[in-house]
Amino acid sequence: MQVFFIFKFNTMDPNILYIIIAIISLGLGFAIAKIIEKKRASGTIGRSKKEAATIIKEAKAQAEVIKKDKILQAKEKFIELKSEHEKVILARDKKMAEVEKRIRDKESQVSQLLNKNKKEAQELESKIKDYNYRLDFLEKKQKETDKIHKKQVEQLEVLSGLSAEEAKKELIASVKEEAKTDAMAYIQEQMEEAKLTAEQEARKIVLNTIQRVGVEQTVENCVSVFNLDSDDVKGRIIGREGRNIRALEASTGVEIIVDDTPEAIILSCFDPVRREIARLSMHKLVTDGRIHPARIEEIVAKTEKQINQEIAEVGKRTVIDLGIHGLHPELVKVVGRMKFRSSYGQNLLQHSREVANLCGIMAAELGLNPKVAKRAGLLHDIGKVPDEESELPHALLGMKWAEKYGEKSDVCNAIGAHHDEIEMKSLYAPIVQVCDAISGARPGARRQVLDSYIQRLKDLEDTAFAFTGVQKAYAIQAGRELRVIVESDKVTDDQASELSFNISQKIQNDMTYPGQVRVTVIRETRAINVAK
């Protein structure tokens, strides 16, 4: 066979032989490559198996560690839950012990009360027996007394010739006439004594009350001046095309006037609360330096919240200072808002505090409760600080609020009646009315514009000149007194007294003024001679 192949190869064409050899070489190469790949694959498989075994081993080790950690965590959680459960059980046991103790105490108290009631019942039974015995004895005595009285009446009727009813009527008539006469005399005596002493005592109480109270008066107006370090800040406040100043006016509701006044801006508003918010907001913005619409709205909101807190704090401090307790929180806020209100230029909170102190002193002088009087005096003008517009007078609105928030009837009536809108039903109402007049009429308490003040003095003098016989008239003591000098040949002494009354009535009916105006008419006769 080998010889045959060799022969064949030897006899074959060399090209074919090369092809056969090449084919055999390729087959051998493929076979060798497959063998190498198989060896590589078997090596890779072996390494993979080793790596897999290593990974499995490590995974088992990690699983054991995790398992141990979880077991420890579970034990700790169990211990924690157990301790909490024990605490709960202990707390319940403690509560149960306390309840049991209270029950035992109650049982002992109940047993004591039962024993006490038994003793009282026994004592009551003995008293009832004693009372019945005495009642029977008294009834017997009463019957005997009635028999004796009847005999005596019969004897008197025989002696006097009158029946018992006729004698009784005559006795009642005579006693009634005598009592009526004595009563009229006593009433007349008391009225005369009251007339003599009432005015003197009232003046004494008012003067003592005024002398014991002295407060400073605060003057308010509708304009605030905000001072600046330099005029350069005005441009930043105005902003580009006026956007900053418009944002300020829209947020605060205050008119901001920027004029040629050096280093100053004017804030104008009738509401002092809004004006104060605008002033504080302006101060914060200028100090911070960042002035733009968004920042303005933020600062105004914060300032408004701060002012509301201040209002509540002022109300609490005022109530504490005056010793008033149990006031409703809404009324406390209303009292705080009084700080930013004024009446005829007089600060409303200072005025209300002064009226409260005056009321307390005057009530103590009259033997009334000073705490109730102080309460009514502090709240008498709360109707002047409404949250919204109302058509009611401030006295009636204040009374309505006081009733809404649970104030007593005496306080509500004093608030509503201090300007005579309703009838006074207690002594606290005239006290509040008088103290309000004292506080408002105090010299310097209320502010008046110069022009209106001068006009009022002129009107007083013109009122006097309208009467016949008036020669000169002078309004003095800031318009509290009008002195009128008359011509002695045209006005008699009796006419001078009548003239004083007529002028005072005309002033009272035609003019509006705080306090009182005293009219003094002076008439004199002068005899003049010249020695030469």
Image: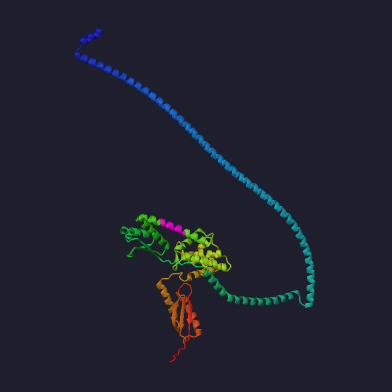
Q: Quadrant of the C terminus?
A: bottom left
Model colouring: rainbow
The residue sitting at 77% across, 64% down in the picture is: 138
201 falls in the magenta region: no
Up the image or down, 276 lies above or below 25; here it is below
Residue 415 in view of the camera: no
The residue sitting at 45% across, 57% down in the picture is: 309
- Percent across and percent down for residue 2 are 26, 8
- Percent across and percent down for residue 425 are 56, 68
Total labels drawn: 0
Q: Which residues are magenta?
A: 302-311
**In the displayed structure, does residue 370 sit left or right of residue 45?**
right
Q: Quadrant of the N terminus?
A: top left
The residue sitting at 44% across, 77% down in the picture is: 475
**In the displayed structure, does residue 374 sit left or right of residue 24?**
right
- Percent across and percent down for residue 180 are 66, 76
Residue 107 in view of the camera: yes
- Percent across and percent down for residue 54 are 40, 26
Magenta span: helix, strand or loop, mainly?
helix
Up the image or down, 63 lies above or below 486; here it is above
The one of 531 and 226 positioned closer to us in this rendering: 531
**In the displayed structure, does residue 126 sit left or right of residue 301?**
right
Direction bottom: furthest residue: 532
